[in-house]
Image (tube, coloured by chain):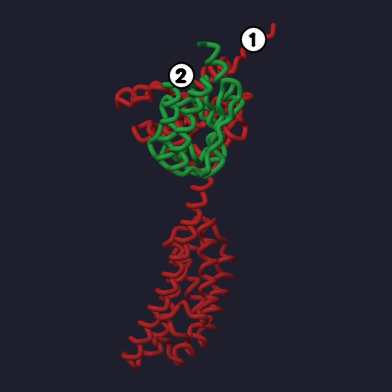
Chain colours: A green, B red
Amino acid sequence: MERIPILRMGDLLLVTIQVDMHDQLALALQDDLTEKIRATSARGVLIDISALDIVDSFIGRMIATISALSRIMDATTVVVGMQPAVAITLVELGLNLTGVRTALNVERGMALLQRTDDES
Amino acid sequence: MAALQQRTTDLIRAHEQQLLTGWVEGLSQAGLLQDNRVTRREVETQVQDFWRLFLAAMGNDINNLQAASWRDIRHFLEDFSRDRVLRGFSSSETATFLFSLKRPLFELVQQHFADSPKELGEQMWTMSELLDQLGLHTVAAFQKTREDVIQRQQEEMLELSTPVVKLWEGVLALPMIGTLDSQRTQVVMESLLQRIVDTGSEIAIIDITGVPTVDTLVAQHLLKTVTAIRLMGADAIISGVRPQIAQTIVHLGLDLQGIVTKANLADALALALKRTGLAVVQAR
């Protein structure tokens, strides 16, 4: 079964979604990611969705769930590189993703994580 | 099949001059010749052109104006209507051009068919129907041209009213002008989000100084735009909130929490610069 790779960079985890997300894949990602956070005690998670151009309500909710999950496990999640069409779709679906941090690209996302790490 | 009789068409051909004079006279009585929008010479040329096409086509079946035999005259009327629209004529003025031909035609037929009332009635009816059909076609073409003009203007307005400007490195501004409806919000949102991606800007300022009124729907559209900008990873600031609009928002009980608002664009820019770690200082 195909899986979404989770890369470790120092105390950060980088998840790059490059294939069309389907529900099974999203659920597997949740399991893998939480497991990985536990194993590496990562401080932050970057989810790069710049290659994702189609979303539905399930994927939208999954993003929110992953964010909430990792927050509980003391890792800050930043969603980076959301496409305009995806942002519009999520808003029209009524998914505001309150509490989820966002950044324009991976670089800025890392800077954001660094900043929050310094503050705490 | 209804068509003009051979006798009638012969009659029309024979009295061409009389009819044309009567027509131009009718136009002049309707006040269509003393008009600074179109010269007398132009109207006369149009009369001549129409007449030439009319003579060629008048013997054909009048119930089927879409037939090939009427094609030239249809095209002439369409061009004529378009020309009249662009010169600012009303639809009735445009139709009167054609209807002024009725009187001289009817008079002519009346004179020559006096001996047989049945034929007279029949020919009058056919003639009237023909001119009505042509008139309707003219008015339809007139309306279509008008609608095209309106649609083009609407599209132009939509494009004109959504410029995204770069205020500073990493700071975009969107001055909104006019009422916000769903369609415009969509266009605005798309162009702004696309520019955010293209320029990698972290702050977008939406200036609503030019938005005349804010109601619940407009506020909802604003909220959507701000949320979409946040999802992309940028920050939004709404500026240009006029006192009346602030009052309306509060009276309507709209919740703009979580949105940074500023009274004018300068304040918003100052905040944006501060967030990007820049400061404006006096040179001397």
At a point 40% along the width and 40% down the height, the residue shown is A57
Secondary element at tag 1: loop
Rendered view: B271 above or below B25: above
- Mark 1 falls within which chain? B
Rendered view: A58 above or below B281: below
Q: Which image quadrant is residue A58 in?
A: top left
Q: Is residue B236 visible?
A: no
- Mark 2 falls within which chain? A
Q: Which image quadrant is residue B39 in?
A: bottom right
Distance from disc 2 to disc 1, alpha carbons, whole Å, reads 41 Å
Residue B217: x %, y % from top left: 36, 35
Mark 2 nearby-residue class (10 Å; few <14, some 14–19, many ≥20): some
Callout count:
2
A96 or B47: nearer the viewer: A96
Secondary element at tag 2: loop
> Which residue is at the far top?
B284
Q: Are the residues tagged 2 and 1 within 8 Å (C-beta)? A: no
Mark 1 nearby-residue class (10 Å; few <14, some 14–19, many ≥20): few
Q: Which amino acid does label 1 sit on?
A: Val
Q: What residue type is labelled 2?
A: Asp
Q: Mark 2 points at which residue?
A: A74
Q: Which image quadrant is residue B64 in?
A: bottom left
B85 or A22: nearer the viewer: A22
Residue B95: x %, y % from top left: 44, 66
Residue A96: x %, y % from top left: 41, 31
At a point 44% along the width and 30% down the height, the residue shown is A66
Q: Is residue B131 visible?
A: yes
> Which residue is at the far right?
B284
Q: Which mark is residue B171?
A: none
Marks 2 and 1 belong to one chain? no
Q: Residue B281 carries which label?
A: 1
